[in-house]
Image: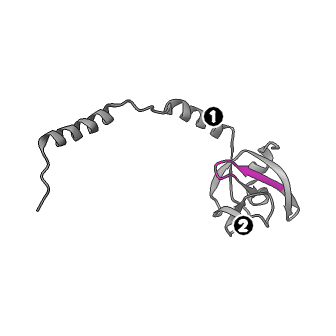
Amino acid sequence: MYPTVSFPIVTALLGIVSQTAARSVAIPDIENANQNNMETRQSLQRCSIAGTSARVNCRASPTRSSSSVVSFLPGESFGVECMVDGEGIDGEKAWGYLPSFACWVAVRWTDLGCKRKLPTC
């Protein structure tokens, strides 16, 4: 009922598997990648959600009508690279860019330290 497999075939198959496993595989330079990532992180301003008890949306562009990419709870922090003027919220037009999420958060909803230290994009 079961097919018969001869030992030469099994040996040949095992040889193929071992040869494939023995081939060298390029390993990414993890140390340099981590170093580049650390340099990027160091250039970000650490900001957190403040001034609201609601979730704050991070949007695809600096306007309230833009689609939400991610939302943050009050007190949650994130890295902001820079700011631009966008749609005003309560008189505040600045929006911060979050490269980790590729989105924009209204600076109106961030802590005061964040607002003072962000460079212009």
Q: Quadrant of residue 9?
A: top left
Q: Quarter of the image for the N terminus: give it.
A: bottom left
Instruction: Please tell me whether residue 27 is drawn above or below residue 50 in the rendered image.
Output: above
How many neighbours does mark 2 have within 10 angstroms: few (below 14), some (14-19), or many (20 or more)?
A: few
Q: Amino acid at mark 1?
A: Glu
**Extent of the magenta region:** 94-102
Residue, disc 1: 39
For label 1, the SS is helix
Instruction: Please tell me whether residue 101 is drawn above or below residue 71 in the rendered image.
Output: above
Say which residue appears at 23% left-offset and 41% top-offset. Answer: 13
Task: Report the residue that reaches farthest toward the right.
Answer: 91
Q: Quadrant of residue 119?
A: top right
Q: Is residue 77 left or right of residue 60?
A: left
Q: Is residue 5 left or right of residue 21?
A: left
Q: Between 114 and 15, which is closer to the camera in this rendering?
A: 15
Q: Between 68 and 50, which is closer to the camera in this rendering?
A: 68
Q: Is residue 9 left or right of residue 30?
A: left
Q: Amino acid at mark 2?
A: Thr
Q: Between 104 and 75, which is closer to the camera in this rendering?
A: 104
Residue, disc 2: 52
Say which residue appears at 79% left-offset and 67% top-offset. Answer: 65
Q: Quadrant of residue 75?
A: bottom right
CA gap between label 1 and label 2 equals: 31 Å
Image coords of residue 100 (percent x, y): 64, 49
As drawn, the label of residue 68 is none
Q: Quarter of the image for the C terminus: give it.
A: top right
Q: Which numbered disc, 1 or 2, marks the residue that appears first in the sequence?
A: 1
Q: Is residue 24 left or right of residue 6?
A: right
Q: Is residue 83 magenta?
A: no
